[in-house]
Image (spheres, rainbow, N blue to C red):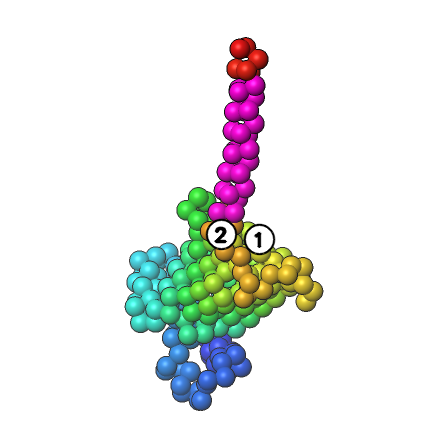
Amino acid sequence: MFERLKEDIAVTKERDPAVHSVLEILFLYPGLKAIRMHRRAYFWWNHHAKFLARYISQRAARKTGIEIHPAAKIGRRFFIDHGTGVVIGETAEIGDDVTLYQGVTLGGTGKDTGKRHPTIGNGVLIGAGAKVLGPFTVGDNSNIAAGAVVLDEIPPDSTAVGVPARVVKRCGKRVDRLDQVHIPDPVAQELCKMTVQIERMQKEIARLTEENQQYKEAKE
């Protein structure tokens, strides 16, 4: 237990430049408090005391603003920065050395049964407000941009951005010209598709009208 706590403190000092002291981390960091309480909840969940486990997890959510289901599997050196609004579902699995920022959801789509939540590989960083939804894997050492909505598997060593998220870098090499500033507007994309379809329909209507007129003229 103390080894894990030492790791958590070291990770917080390493990843948060705003840290001033160990006491600050121990008493004032909601991410650390949520993780420590989750470990207790996870223990009781796996020892058939599910009510107690849920009680601990809900108490943690009220105290920290971070909701982690007691059945979620979380690796070592897990770091939640700021943390408000983070939600981690029941069947989520998180590897070692993962970082989450505020507002991240590791959730389900409502369409799956059994394994419903994502598996996050080692060394993954997920930016503020990102949503990872579904029973797929985000590969090791990948980065998910702030505000991204991830609905499909992300390969290892990748960077994904956008709504829905798409991979723009693999192994440090750009595979798409998209960046976090020039994210496509999904509404604009749909409107563009509709405009193209309307133009095709108008052309087809004009063609049929012309053929009908020619037919009438031929009968006369």
Q: Would you say residue 196 sits in the magenta stretch?
A: yes
Q: Nearer the viewer, residue 52 or 153?
A: 153
* Amino acid type assigned to the residue bearing label 2 in the image: Ala
Q: Which residue lies at the image location 42% right of the left edge and 82% below the top edge?
A: 25
Q: Nearer the viewer, mark 2 or mark 1?
A: 2
Left or right? Give the position of 202 relative to 102: right
* Amino acid type assigned to the residue bearing label 1 in the image: Glu
**Is 112 above or below relative to 61?**
above
Q: Give the range drawn in magenta.
A: 191-214
Q: Which residue is label 2 attached to?
A: 188
Residue that protrudes farthest toward the top in the picture:
219
Mark 2 or mark 1, which has the lower sequence index?
1
Q: Nearer the viewer, residue 214 or 123?
A: 214
In the picture, residue 60 is in which quadrant? bottom left
**Mark 1, other Cα within 10 Å: few <14 / some 14–19 / many ≥20:** some
Main secondary structure found in the magenta portion = helix
**Mark 2, other Cα within 10 Å: few <14 / some 14–19 / many ≥20:** few
Q: Which residue lies at the image location 46% right of the left edge and 51% below the top edge?
A: 187
Q: What is the secondary structure assignment of the residue under circle 1?
A: loop
Q: How many numbered marks, from 0 up? A: 2
Q: Where is residue 180 in the image (x, y as percent from the top left)?
A: 55, 65
Q: Which residue is label 1 attached to?
A: 153
Whole-angstrom CA distance, mark 2 to mark 1, is 25 Å
Q: Is residue 14 visible?
A: yes
